[in-house]
């Protein structure tokens, strides 16, 4: 059985362009459109005119 669609980076790839809610280790929450990510799961989230770059090791969860 293949799990190629269930890997974290595959889930992020499928979420690019969609609205997400990102919960951080410090309890903070960022929401907006996921516009990019990298292999370290660093995220770029845009809300209105504001762009936020979130370091991957600070992320607890990402919800679509």
Image (cartoon, rainbow, N blue to C red):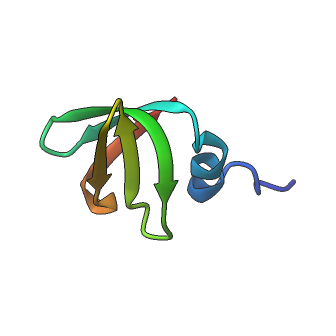
Residue in the picture at 28% in, 34% down: 30
- In this picture, residue 6 sits left or right of residue 43: right
- Quarter of image, res 61: top left
Indicate whether 48 appears above or below 61.
above
The mark tally for this picture is 0
- In this picture, residue 59 sits left or right of residue 3: left
If the image is split into quadrants, where does the N terminus sit? bottom right
The front one of 38 and 59 is 38
Q: Which residue lies furthest to the right in this view?
A: 1
Residue in the picture at 59% in, 58% down: 9
- In this picture, residue 47 sits left or right of residue 34: left
Indicate whether 45 appears above or below 18.
below
Residue 2 image offset from top left, x and y in percent: 84, 56
Q: Which residue lies furthest to the bottom in this view?
A: 39
Residue in the picture at 28% in, 47% down: 52
Residue in the picture at 24% in, 32% down: 29
Residue 18 image offset from top left, x and y in percent: 56, 33
Residue 21 image offset from top left, x and y in percent: 38, 30
Q: Residue furthest front?
A: 49
């Amino acid at each position: 059985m293949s799990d190629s669609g269930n890997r974290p980076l595959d889930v992020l790839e499928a979420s690019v362009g969609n609205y997400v809610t990102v919960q951080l280790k410090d309890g903070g929450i960022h929401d907006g459109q996921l516009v990019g990510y990298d292999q370290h799961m660093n995220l770029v989230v845009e809300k209105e005119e504001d762009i936020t770059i979130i370091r991957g090791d600070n992320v607890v969860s990402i919800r679509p």
